[in-house]
Image: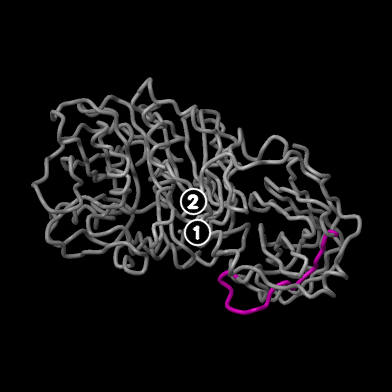
Amino acid sequence: MRVRTALVALTLLTVTPAAAHAGAVPPGATWSQATITEADGTRLHADVLRPSTLPADAKTPVILSVGPYVNHSGQTGPAGPVEGTGYDPAGPSAGPSDRFLDFVQGAHLMEKGYTFVMVDLRGFGGSSGCLDWAGPGEQADVKAAVQWSASRPWSTGKVGMYGKSYDGVTGLIGAVEHPAGLAAVVSQEPVYDLYRYLYSDGIRYENSVATPALYDLIADTPGPLQDDPAYNAAGMNDLARPGCPALNWLDQQSSDHGAAYWKARNLIPRAAGSDVPVFLTQGFLENNTKPDGAWDFYDALKGPKRAWFGMWDHVRGNDVDAGGRLKMGRPGWFDEVMRWFDHYVKGDAAADPGSDPPVEVQTSDGTWRAEQAWPPADAAPLTATLKPGTYRDDATNNGSQDGALTSTSGQGAWTFSPPLAHDAHLAGLPRVHVELTGILLPDTNLVADLYDVAPDGTATLISRNGRLVATNGAYDLALYGQDWRFAAGHRVGVLVTGANAEWWLHAPTLQTVTVNAGSVALPWLARTRTSDLAGGRAVRLDEYLAAAPFTVPAATIAAGTAPGFALPPAQTP
């Protein structure tokens, strides 16, 4: 997935060893390629890395990644230079993708006796077929890849899945499909409902037009010129759906969340039926795959689960910036991942994932703590009444100045709490209810924003969500989850407005909408928390705090303050 601009019968196949080359084969690994043929005729290409120190027939546990980014010529095709990924359409020699070379080497997979398998989704790399945007076809691909990996003569029959973004989504598909052999999943910054990557209840995100076209471009990218001709021939074969690129783009232009196309791509309702162990990461400040639906999915899972939640965006647990600073802020990512895989996939009795907290949370001050669950059990919703007001549905308001092209922010119906008498800690999903009139046209924009407002009037957006509404009436919004400390003297601010222009592509109706009444339910922690885990501030947290705030005029705060705004009592230790 990208920053704003993203069942089967198996045929036994031979794995053909590849010639030695200077590609991305890590030290200690032997590379081979294979083809997986599905019941519908789709042929999936697989790159297989095996420990070179083991006999060819030695049985090993398998870690699998399935996705659109493992083309031999580069992860994101011609967009690579913009996306920060390599692209080599000629190539001195063919070779496996380097997408997870950091994981293979950083986690010492070969030394630990794992096989690593990378499989192209249909329509990508060396796989035939038409890309399916996590639909039934790609769900079949995931199931086929897991079952194939588990059934190889060199496999113990236990498979773990590892990925980030799109290949994090395929891990969640594996979890809800639960194919034979799948023993554990590690999914970083995925999408839980593919609709919510492009839309928010009818409102288009900024990437809703460009991203589907980009994936068409990635799918149409051949492998290196010097690669096996069969690799490129398979990847260009979309005869299963002639006109695939255009049709795929058109499929995703439906903004109807209830459409059959999107229902098939919503993984959240299926999470409750999964007992596969899942290790998840989700950034509260994620501006790519976004946190919408994250905790609905995570909390519904029935099997063993653990997570890192915190103040980052679209990054991996081991990513560092140019200065070597961990982008998430916490050391030990590969150690924790391998305790997870060693326990559930390898069956190593000495590996104890229970030694790691179920949830590791980074809050808004950059500190880390352990939780048994998130939202925490003592996060008690407290409902406050919103003041009436109006907003103009003209698509001009920005929710924050982070990424904004204009300085227009804070336009709409405000409600402010009195200054907090003591520190308070919000942890969970805020919810807003509003009753609207003045709506004469369908597809009217409704956005709710939650702010931390400092004594000097500086407002920092901490959560939001939006939707389209058709008629006068009552509407509810579940905002993005957040873990945020409010300092004494700060206020809570709630803005009901018609746009977050830096976040969505709004089609304005130019109506003036009246907010007659409303309420906000905020989850406040009853007990104090202390930092009990090692870790520093996420890089994105500092960037966001520097870029996002804007100043609300003192007169606006005075007029919008609700003296009876329900605020939490002082926390207990």
Image position of 96 (left or right of 355): left
Reply yes or no: does residue 404 show up in magenta: yes
* Range shown magenta: 402-418
Residue 27 in the image: x percent, y percent?
18, 44
Mark 1 lies on residue: 539
Reply yes or no: does residue 124 show up in magenta: no
Seen as rendered, the residue at the extreme top is 349
Residue 431 in the image: x percent, y percent?
73, 50
- Check the picture and name the quadrant holding the C terminus: top right
- Check the picture and name the quadrant holding the N terminus: bottom left
Q: Secondary structure at mark 1?
A: helix
Residue 94 in the image: x percent, y percent?
15, 55
Question: How far separated are the C-alphas under marks 1 and 2?
Answer: 7 Å
Total numbered circles: 2
From the viewer's side, name the closer residue of 551 and 505: 551
From the viewer's side, name the closer residue of 489 and 13: 489
Residue 284 numbered tag: none
From the viewer's side, name the closer residue of 242 and 343: 343
**Above or below 568: residue 510:** below
Mark 2 lies on residue: 329
Residue 37 in the image: x percent, y percent?
25, 39
Name the main secondary structure of what is drawn in magenta. Answer: loop
**Above or below 479: residue 103:** above
State the residue at coordinates (83%, 57%).
518
Q: Amino acid at mark 2?
A: Gly
Q: Amino acid at mark 1?
A: Val
- Marks 1/2 in contact by CB < 8 Å: the verdict is yes
Q: Mark 2, residues whose alpha carbon is within 10 Å: few (<14), some, or many (≥20)? A: many
